[in-house]
Image (cartoon, grey):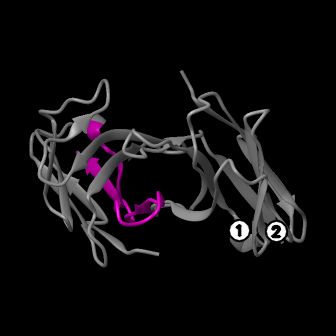
Amino acid sequence: QQQVKQSPQSLIVQKGGISIINCAYENTAFDYFPWYQQFPGKGPALLIAIRPDVSEKKEGRFTISFNKSAKQFSLHIMDSQPGDSATYFCAASMRGSNYKLTFGKGTLLTVNP
Amino acid sequence: GAVVSQHPSWVICKSGTSVKIECRSLDFQATTMFWYRQFPKQSLMLMATSNEGSKATYEQGVEKDKFLINHASLTLSTLTVTSAHPEDSSFYICSTRSQGMNTEAFFGQGTRLTVV
């Protein structure tokens, strides 16, 4: 059972455009929702994270939108740059499980110059 | 963010041999460590969770006798792939978190294992 569903699988955006990646979760006990960026051959790096008590969080060009009633959250990358080309993973975790992360399947983002 | 050092970054070994991968937290005490496996173009699959000084908890379907995890100190965890076979070839990644911090997880740079 896939607890975190991520879409799209791949995304191509022009430089300067907005990249949007969506995730949906099933377990209402999740209380922490991070996004990770991974470059080929490297480990994931935390990009931005949100908790369910807020509906939006912005850090620079990256924004998480969170809809608790719909059990959905999304990553928006404004003014996308070729250097943003990477694989992005959403994830979710909850207290009482060692905070282990449940990952989405990932989105390969390509930003064309 | 915290620094997690994973070593080696890549290794090639012969079938039947064992390989040890180290994961070190360099600037905080990692009470919990996670080991993941990632196949090309796929997501991270959690293999096991270890807490310092106790036995690791393995996810369903992961052979504990094949993937030995030791978390003997607050700064070091090791994953040993025993009697490796070509199907064990994969990208292995460790992750740590501390009870003293928020729930943010820090990842190592990963180890590319190729079994020939």
The C terminus of chain B lies in which quarter of the figure?
top left
Q: Magenta segment, which residues?
A: B88-116
Which amino acid, mark 2?
A: Ser
* Coordinates of residue B73 in the picture (x, y in percent): 13, 63
Residue B59 falls in image quadrant:
top left
Residue B112 falls in image quadrant:
bottom left
In front: A87, or A78? A78
* Residue, disc 2: A80
Residue B43 seen by the camera: no
In the image, B37: left or right of A21? left
Chain containing mark 2: A
Chain containing mark 1: A
Spatial separation of the CA atoms under disc 1 and disc 2? 7 Å
The number of numbered badges drawn on the structure is 2
Tell me which residue sits at (82%, 57%) in the image: A19
Mark 1, Cα crowd under 10 Å, few <14 / some 14-19 / many 20+, is some
As helix, strand or loop, the secondary structure at mark 1 comes to helix
Q: Are marks 1 and 2 in contact (CB under 8 Å)?
A: yes
Q: Which residue sits furthest bottom?
A: B27
Q: Are marks 1 and 2 on the same chain?
A: yes
Q: Is residue B14 above or below residue B45?
A: below
Which amino acid, mark 1?
A: Asp
* Residue, disc 1: A84
Residue B57 seen by the camera: yes
